[in-house]
Image: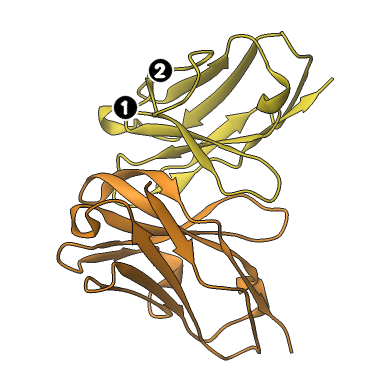
């Protein structure tokens, strides 16, 4: 079955970086994009960006430009999201999701279970 | 950036009743590129509707979506106990994807 399996919870200090992985299975990885969405405690969903698993093209949310990098490894069908210069307000559950649609215009039809990232001194 | 405003913030209904959730966009959503998601506590969101009115795989037909332009609606025809959750709309008609702030559907 189609699934996305994310890496485990992380605790980081302010100013550090975190890299979350998302391993896809059950479908042709390069035929879809991967989107990343985060959710701060008790808050709504925030779109972070998208990467094409076909050619590596990316599209990031403006507020995260310069701090976030999304990559893929097609040999292992794994997507990665790295966030740098962490702040306390980056504390959230980070989800990866399969992006279905055309290029930047997609909905998210399969989701990982989420990775909790806690930023605390 | 397209801002999505969902209403009401909280909806209190009983099982068996009909639920109507609204999502209004600050500008027209091209090609009706609007999706709805359900999220239960401690779980990832689940896709319900895409393209404003197409049900995702495995979604019961009591869920339906409608609307175009700036006004969209998610209707649950007859609430089941498992439907009480938070619902989000998402637009994908622009390269900057946005979500609404959510509607909490609670048991009355």
Mark 1 falls on what kind of element? helix
User: Any mark on residue B67, and which?
Assistant: 2
Q: What is the C-alpha distance between the residues marked 2 and 1?
A: 8 Å
- Among the 4 quarters of the image, the one containing residue B70: top left
Q: Are marks 2 and 1 in contact (CB under 8 Å)?
A: yes
Q: Residue at 60% x, 73% y: name it.
A: A90
**In this rendering, position of residue A28 left or right of residue B70:** left
Q: Residue furthest left?
A: A55
- Label 1, on which residue? B32
Residue toward you, A83 or A100: A100
Q: Quadrant of the C terminus of chain A?
A: bottom right
Chain for disc number 1: B
**Callout 1: 10 Å neighbours few (<14), some, many (20+)?**
many
Residue B102 relative to residue A56: left or right: right
Instruction: Identify the chain of the residue marked 2, using the numbered disc in the image.
Output: B
Q: Position of residue B98 (x, y in %)?
A: 44, 47
Q: Residue B57: horizontal and vertical position, in percent?
A: 39, 29
Task: Name which residue lies at 35% across and 51% down.
Answer: A98
For residue B19, above or below residue A2: above
Q: Could you say where residue B54 lies in the image, as x and y percent from the top left?
A: 35, 22
Using the image, tell me which numbered label, if any, was put on residue A117. none
**Most foreground residue, A27 or B8:** A27
Task: Examine the rendered structure and indicate whether residue B99 appears above or below residue B80.
Answer: below
Q: Is residue B53 left or right of residue B17?
A: left
Chain A appears what colour?
orange
Q: Quadrant of residue A22?
A: bottom left
Chain letter corresponding to the colour yellow: B
Secondary structure under the numbered disc 2 in the rendered image: strand
């Amino acid at each position: 079955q189609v699934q996305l399996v994310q890496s485990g919870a992380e605790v980081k200090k302010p100013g550090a970086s975190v890299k979350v992985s998302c391993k896809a299975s059950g479908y042709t990885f390069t035929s879809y994009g991967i989107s990343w969405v985060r959710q701060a405690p008790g808050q709504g969903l925030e779109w972070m960006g998208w990467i094409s698993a076909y050619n590596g093209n990316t599209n990031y949310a403006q507020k995260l430009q310069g701090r976030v990098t999304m990559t893929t490894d097609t040999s292992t069908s794994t997507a990665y999201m790295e966030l740098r210069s962490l702040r306390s307000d980056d504390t959230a559950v980070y989800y990866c999701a399969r992006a279905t649609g055309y290029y930047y215009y997609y909905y998210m039809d399969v989701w990982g279970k989420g990775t909790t990232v806690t930023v605390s001194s | 950036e397209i801002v999505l405003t969902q209403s009401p913030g909280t909806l209190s209904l009983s099982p068996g009743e009909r639920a109507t959730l609204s999502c209004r966009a600050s500008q027209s959503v091209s090609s009706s590129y609007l999706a709805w998601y359900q999220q239960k506590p401690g779980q990832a969101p689940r896709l319900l509707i895409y393209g404003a009115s197409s049900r995702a795989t495995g979604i019961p037909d009591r869920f339906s979506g409608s609307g175009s332009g700036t006004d969209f609606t998610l209707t649950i025809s007859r609430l089941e106990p498992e439907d009480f959750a938070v619902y989000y709309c998402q637009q994908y008609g622009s390269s900057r994807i946005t979500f609404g702030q959510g509607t909490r559907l609670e048991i009355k």
